[in-house]
């Protein structure tokens, strides 16, 4: 769903996805490459790809908890899919990956669940055994977009795999997850969303990538795929 390669001189209008936002928090150089030159980024090693595959499997497990849910894939084309997702909200059933947009900032939640009185709650599913700082930023961004797009969000959750619990293809999804209500913890992360969106958009609107010195961000949560390239240019 990423609109890779899109550029505009007006950074305030630049399309900014959830991935763009999280990438920008991690590293502005990475975010720029992801947005404009993904073709120039090396592939992740097989071990990292296996981590991603595991994450996808855990995401599918979480959906099994909501058998009446709908995966909001929709028709081809970004605008058509947005319309489709908007229409799905009327059905008041659990929605998976329902994409909404506010002022060209785009979010899609793993699980969007209707609650009483036309309200909603959403759940960010993590394959890790706990909650990392970036997960709060992720939820805060989703909350910002969803709320401003018109949804009344009652609660936000992060659901991770319970520590000490093996989780595989055959696991019972009712037995592997810990669901944490993080609504009350979001304020410091929500408070910076607009500033961060502005900052990241400004960088993404640049015609060249910013120079960012290698640092802790290069190995968190796994080694960045740009690592060797950045090391080479830092050593040159
Ligand atoms: S290797 Fe480090 S500096 Fe280079 S893009 Fe990745 S996170 Fe940024």
Image: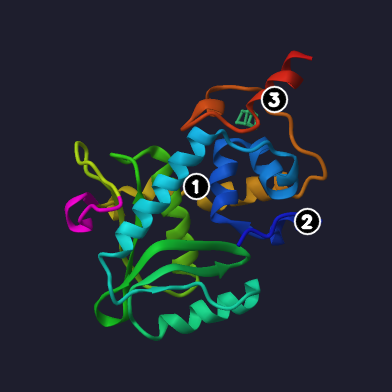
Q: As drawn, is 64 to the left or to the right of 40?
A: left
Which residue lies at the image location 44% right of the left edge and 40% below the top edge? 51
Q: Quadrant of residue 70?
A: bottom left
Depth check, front residue: 82 or 64: 64
Q: Is the CB–ligand 1 distance for label 3 below 8 Å?
A: yes
The answer to which of marks 3 and 1 sits earlier in the sequence is 1
Q: Which mark is residue 1?
A: none
Q: Nearer the viewer, residue 203 or 190?
A: 203
Q: Earlier in the sequence, mark 1 or mark 2?
A: 2
Quickly name the residue at label 2: 7
Q: Quadrant of ligand 1?
A: top right
**What whole-number distance in Å separates the C-alpha atoms at marks 1 and 2?**
24 Å
Q: Measure the C-alpha gap from mark 3 to mark 1.
A: 28 Å
| Residue linked to disc 1 | 192
**Quarter of the image with the N terminus in it:** bottom right
The reply to whether discs 1 and 2 touch (Cβ–Cβ < 8 Å) is no
The residue lying at 50 percent from left, 80 percent from top is 86
- In the rendered image, which residue does mark 3 sit on? 230
- Classify residue 30 as left or right of residue 114: right
Residue 193 visible in the snapshot: yes
């Amino acid at each position: 769903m990423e609109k890779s390669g899109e550029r505009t001189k007006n950074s305030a209008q630049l399309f900014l996805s959830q991935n763009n936002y999280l990438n920008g928090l991690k590293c502005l150089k990475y975010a720029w490459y992801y947005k404009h030159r993904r073709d120039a980024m090396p592939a992740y090693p097989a071990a990292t790809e296996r981590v991603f595959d595991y994450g996808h499997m855990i995401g599918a497990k979480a959906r099994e908890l909501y058998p009446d849910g709908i995966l909001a894939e929709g028709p081809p084309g970004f605008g058509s899919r947005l319309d489709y997702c908007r229409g799905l909200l009327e059905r008041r059933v659990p929605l998976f990956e329902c994409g909404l947009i506010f002022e060209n900032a785009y979010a899609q939640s793993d699980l969007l669940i209707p609650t009483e009185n036309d309200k909603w709650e959403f759940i960010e599913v993590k394959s890790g055994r706990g909650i990392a700082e970036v997960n709060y930023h992720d939820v805060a961004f989703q909350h910002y977009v969803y709320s401003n797009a018109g949804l009344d969000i009652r609660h936000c959750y992060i659901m991770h795999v319970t520590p000490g619990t093996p989780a595989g293809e055959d696991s019972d999804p009712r037995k592997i997850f810990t669901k944490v209500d993080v609504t009350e913890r979001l304020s410091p992360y929500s408070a910076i969303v607009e500033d961060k969106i502005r900052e990241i958009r400004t960088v993404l609107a640049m015609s060249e990538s910013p120079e960012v010195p290698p640092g802790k961000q290069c190995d968190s949560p796994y080694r960045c795929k740009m690592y060797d390239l950045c090391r080479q240019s830092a050593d040159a």
